[in-house]
Image (spheres, rainbow, N blue to C red):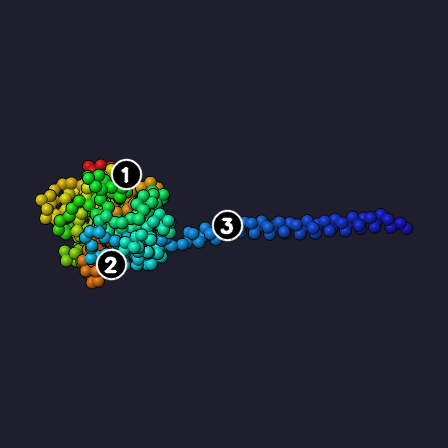
């Protein structure tokens, strides 16, 4: 009997079986490779994730060459604590001319996402002025409170580079008073907390004493607040994005008191690719330890927190130029 044909068939079967095993193995390996590749695509890139979650770096300048506000220590404390509370930024300070020389060169500024002038005054000794403005224009942030507008004025009636960047300059002020600015942009990070408060106003408005102690309130789109109110120059609402404004001169004891006129209280603007935020509020308290005023006011703190989030690029806000006053 001949076994040649069955043996050949058996050999062919073995070959086909081996081929099937190899094919199945290859399929499993390919499947695993696809899964691993998909996982690699879906998983966050370590560098990108770290960059997204990293805290921002904020440089707060409180050097003064003119009047020095008693509220500066509280301003420093408030800005630093807001960063810690939110976990959004770490705060560094420029308190002296030496600090300014080392921390505000073009190279040193690369370590920060934004700079704040918190009640600065006068001609600050910027080590490299053009490098500072170029830093903002390149896409970084700048914020200023109150006398940040009484800083680096122009000469001979000209608007300084700083004034152009900020969007206005301090001209004068009179006695402290209560104002009721209208919230013109309810969607900015610096005004959204005010709108939220205005949707649930207090049943009984705070007394004048409470207002003066840092207990402002909002009703609808009107913020009632007490502070030293600046009158500005070189401040055109059509060149900035207005957040808060009043439609009459403050009742501050001056000859112009209560007369009609549009005065800006807070705004944002673009400067090159950079983001700018300013508020005229922030004079009080005078007592840097136990005083009460703007810097202890929860609504003011929410206002500046939103402004800082905007300039740090943490939250979006419009810089569309405002229309002329009606």
Residue 161 appears at what percent x and percent y? Answer: 27, 41
User: For this view, does 222 lie left or right of residue 269?
Assistant: left
Name the foreground residue: 71 vs 134: 134
Does residue 136 appear left or right of residue 236 in this picture? right
CA distance for labels 1 and 2? 34 Å
- Residue 91 in percent (x, y) is at 33, 56
Q: How far, Cα to Cα, is label 2 from label 3? A: 47 Å
Front in this rendered view, residue 222 or 71: 71
Residue 231 in which image quadrant: top left
Q: Is mark 3 on a helix, strand or loop?
A: helix
Mark 1 vs 2: CB contact within 8 A = no
Label 2 environment density (alpha carbons within 10 Å; few <14, some 14–19, many ≥20): some
Could you say which disc has been placed on residue 42 in the image? 3
Which residue, as the protein is rendered here, is positioned at the far left?
A: 255
Q: Where is residue 233 in the image (x, y as percent from the top left)?
A: 19, 41
Q: Would you call the spot at circle 3 few (<14 residues within 10 Å), some (14-19), or many (20 or more)?
A: few
**Residue at 30% from the left image edge and 55% from the top image edge:** 99
Can you identify the residue that label 2 sits on?
73
**Residue that mark 1 sits on:** 321
How dense is the environment of label 1, judged by Cα within 10 Å: few (below 14), some, or many (20 and up)?
A: some
């Amino acid at each position: 009997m001949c076994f040649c044909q069955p043996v050949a068939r058996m050999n062919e079967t073995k070959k086909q079986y081996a081929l099937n095993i190899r094919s199945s193995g290859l399929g499993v390996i390919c499947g695993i490779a696809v899964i691993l590749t998909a996982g690699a695509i879906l998983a966050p890139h370590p560098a990108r994730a770290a960059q997204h979650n990293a805290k921002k770096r904020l440089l707060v300048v409180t050097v003064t060459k003119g009047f020095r506000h008693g509220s500066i220590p509280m301003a420093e404390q408030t800005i630093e604590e807001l960063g810690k509370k939110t976990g959004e930024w770490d705060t560094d300070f420029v308190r002296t001319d030496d600090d300014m020389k080392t921390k505000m060169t073009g190279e040193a500024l690369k370590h920060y996402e934004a700079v704040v002038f918190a009640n600065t005054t006068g001609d600050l000794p910027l080590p490299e002025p053009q490098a500072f403005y170029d830093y903002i224009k390149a896409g970084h942030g700048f914020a200023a409170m109150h006398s940040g507008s009484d800083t680096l004025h122009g000469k001979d009636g000209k608007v300084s580079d700083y004034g152009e960047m900020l969007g206005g300059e301090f001209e004068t002020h009179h006695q402290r008073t209560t104002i009721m600015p209208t919230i013109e942009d309810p969607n900015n990070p610096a005004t959204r907390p005010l709108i939220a408060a205005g949707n649930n106003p207090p049943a009984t408005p705070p007394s004048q004493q409470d207002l003066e102690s840092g207990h402002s309130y909002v009703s609808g789109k009107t913020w009632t607040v007490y502070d030293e109110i600046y009158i500005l120059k070189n401040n055109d609402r059509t060149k900035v994005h207005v957040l808060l404004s009043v439609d009459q001169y403050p009742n501050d004891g001056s000859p112009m008191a209560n007369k009609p006129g549009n005065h800006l209280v807070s705004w944002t603007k673009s400067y090159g690719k950079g983001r700018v935020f300013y508020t005229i509020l922030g004079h009080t308290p005078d007592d840097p330890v136990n005083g009460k005023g703007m810097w202890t006011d929860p609504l003011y703190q929410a206002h500046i927190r939103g402004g800082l989030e905007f300039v740090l690029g943490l939250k979006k806000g419009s810089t569309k130029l405002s229309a002329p006053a009606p």
